Image: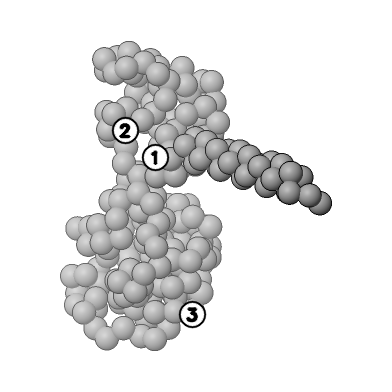
Amino acid sequence: MNDHSIRRYLKALLISFAALAVVALIGLSIEPDKEAPALSQVGSRGKEVTAIQEELKARGLFNVGVTGYYGEETRKAVLRFQRQQGISQTGIAGPITLKALGISVGKIPAATEANIYLLARIISAEARGEPYTGQVAVGAVVLNRIEHPSFPDTLAGVIYQKGAFTAITDGQFNQPISDSAYRAARDALNGWDPTGGCIYYYNPKKTSNKFIWSRPVVITIGDHRFCT
């Protein structure tokens, strides 16, 4: 290969590298913002959508079955609500619409040492002596409440909610934490839910509360009944 050919080859190579760099920069510039909040809109599914449908139904604006799927009927109901409230009519349940509906849904926190410790404390206090699966189940109920619109949106908020857990008021919460409770907290935070989404549990031998007895029982583990 002579000098002229080498120069032509190097020039072509540089042009190719430049083109690749431009493509990479364009790709970076159009990459979606991964931190942008996910909004409930047509095609969405989940607990937030269920909460939206339930609230709209209670207001007489949604007259079909609650499915947890954001379809055309949900969009129309949201539009009607937005029109009533003087909110920008988009058919999308963004933060302003959710606030007007009174809906606030949290997300399961990461399995950090601080979160494991706090969850383990309530598990140990409420389920010490229960089978290991039952301990994980109690942790799962706590976490399920974070994602439910009827409960606080944070781990601490759920645990310290007034009247939620007798262990907070009877001193059990301040007792030493069992080793199994730490493991159970970690498993629950990492996604194990033996209850299948329950938000209540109770020991039928220790309570006569009419409300909790009225809840549909999904599963019984040890001495606890887990309910929706």
Report x, y in % for residue 172: 24, 78
The residue singled out by tag 3 in the image is 131
Q: Are marks 2 and 1 in contact (CB under 8 Å)?
A: yes
Report x, y in % for residue 115: 33, 68
Identity, as a three-letter code, of the amino acid under mark 2? Pro
- Residue sitting at x 34%, y 74%: 113
Left or right, residue 32 beside residue 80? right
Mark 3 vs mark 1: give the one in front. 1
Q: Which mark is residue 60?
A: none
| Residue furthest to the front | 3
| Residue furthest to the right | 1
Q: Residues within 10 Å of mark 2 (few under 14, many from 20)?
A: some
Report x, y in % for residue 66: 50, 32
Q: Are marks 3 and 2 in contact (CB under 8 Å)?
A: no
Q: In this rendering, is residue 65 above or below 79?
A: below
Mark 2 vs mark 1: give the one in front. 1
Mark 3 vs mark 2: give the one in front. 2
Q: Residues within 10 Å of mark 1 (few under 14, many from 20)?
A: few
